[in-house]
Amino acid sequence: MKRTIELDAGARDALTASGIATMRQRARVIQLLDAAERVGIAPLRAGRLHAFAYLADVLSPVWHLPAFEGKILKIEGGPHYPELQREIDRLVVMGIIKVSEISYIPRPDEGARIDGLYSLNLDSPKLPGILSALGARELVDALDPLDAEVHAFLVDLAGALASVPDDEIDTAATVDATYADERIHVSNVIDFGKWTTDIHVDNISLRTVDRFRKFLPEGAMLTSGEKLYLYASFLGRRIHAG
Amino acid sequence: MPDEFSDPIPGVSEAEVAGAVQNLTKIPVTALENRERFVVAVRSLVESRAQSGWNNEGGEDVGVFLLAPYPREVGERYGATAVSDLIATDDPILGRMFFLNRDASSGRGMALPVAANEIVEWVADQKLDHLPMVVVHRNKKLLISRPQGASGDARNDLIRDKPPVASIEEIDEALKVSHRELLLTPSICPPGVWESGRSSQYVPGPLPEKAIQRQLATVLTSWFHGVVKAEMEDSITVGRIDIRLLRPGTDGKFAYWVILELKVIKSSHNAKKKAKAKEVKLVENAEVVAEGIRQASAFGKDRNAEPFLEIYDLRKDKTSDILGHIVVVNELNKSTLKPQCRVWPLYGSASDARLAGWP
């Protein structure tokens, strides 16, 4: 059951469409980092955090959840979400996220992308309340029960990715069946769930996950978690096949 | 919508998918609670080290593993450093303490903070005794797990220096160990097998089969991790299979290997405290066993698997041979696929077990 919160006039004014989008991005960053903390792979480099965000999007149908973003611009070097990075930076300023080892990564054309090691600031007094509200603690404390479901999915996915060597998590996103689809060229948008009418056609990662059942006897079932771990195994094999 | 099984997937080969599925017996057991999942994962890690001759371990004897909700947070308190993918690497695990995730794959590790015989006290002093804990003793080949934390009950498992094989003999051994170590008497039995406070009167819990099923599925999962996949319950047209075991075939596809049907025979029905427990007659127990034979046989045929019927005997008076009862004998004679039937005695008190000759 959803909880309702009484908002004062100022807070109501802040909840414009762009304000809500910002809050959703921040919530997503915090949930991703909490999942990474729980499976022991935090702190994460920016590239790995974006890779994790992308894989969470493309694999969310495995958990019967909607993708946060159903599309991504295919670029050299792997998935990158500018809006997500902007909110990561803001959360650093707000003291919710810690960053260390900051550096600049040159981009292929021009300019540079900021990089660093990101983790939750577990000393922040605000963090426990935020995590509770986002479903990362007890289900009854979640403002929206769906958030608890999203969080459980992210923890399982992070656990699956923890089976891929640490320095290969960002590579895992680039060999993902959807991202690596050669029919979509660099600098084009990959649509795996935004405008598509059938995700089973356009989300190739999901089709790959569904194909696992072909190798099991009739009636055998895979849990959503098992599907994620098998897909991580698929990615690991692709990385090493090279 | 493309055909799930036959349409080609752009850029993805069948061999890649088949290769990934081969890991099904090795991936974490997501159906278990985190505590049990952690114990299974640590056992798998430790035995893989033992089976490779404790490569890279030096002379240390003891390793400690704690399941931490936030491994970095607790690890940083003690200056522990990051560890990742302990299964794939040969980083030493002995002489060390780890704060890990539920798959025992990543987290933080450090040198043992105190002597091995002071670990449990140290963990309690640090207020970490709520964390599920596994202690490894290399020389004694012993794995002591405390899924409820350092202050909870301990369970001992042998560290096997040879990997398990998918054989009927190994299933027998796993069932024997689980019976002796985890079911025989009320103090080691999972909750739900006996009615609380009434085990000495031989009053079973409301759903003893469920409690035993869960325990056995956990044991078999742990025992055969990396070799066989154990699953609980499967609804098919002829009923529900309690436990099924799948193993990979030479063609790269998994197939059913064994199905286990569980039945409980008892002296009385469940009754809450002070209520009179209604007696269960011998013929009623025999009918339960006969039903188990029918189910195991039907499931075995349906799944093309070897059927087993495991009967847990919660009766106070165990003298009458249930498998010799005419109802059971007739059912076995009718059966075209006879399940292997075994009776496992469970006792309402430790003294009754001793009187029956159990150590």
Image: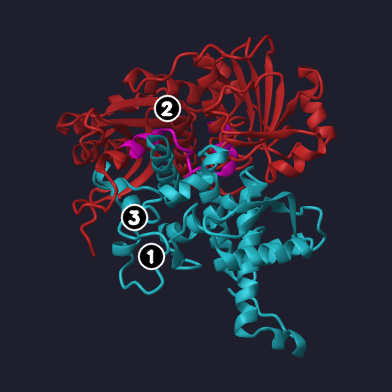
Q: Residues within 10 Å of mark 1 (few under 14, many from 20)?
A: many
Examine the residues drawn in magenta and state their main secondary structure. Answer: helix
The amino acid marked with disc number 2 is Phe
User: Which chain has been coloured red in this picture?
Assistant: B
Q: Magenta residues? A: B19-40
In front of the other: B320 or A34: A34
Residue denoted by label 1: A192
A202 or B99: which is nearer to us? Answer: A202
Whether residue B7 is visible, yes or no, is yes
Residue type marked 1: Phe
Residue, disc 3: A181
Q: Chain of mark 3?
A: A
Q: Quadrant of residue B350?
A: top right
Q: Are marks 3 and 2 on the same chain?
A: no
- Residue B116 image position (x, y, % from top left): 76, 18
| The furthest residue to the right | B125
Q: In the current view of this chain or complex, which residue is farthest to the front?
A: A110
Q: Residue at x 42, y 35 (%)?
A: A240
| Image quarter hosting the C terminus of chain A | top left
Question: Mark 3 vs mark 1: which is more N-terminal?
Answer: 3
Residue at image position (43%, 18%) is B163
Residue behind mark 2: B224
State how far apart marks 3 and 1 are (Cα). Answer: 11 Å
User: Which type of secondary structure does the marked residue at label 1 adopt?
Assistant: loop
Left or right: A108 in relation to A181: right
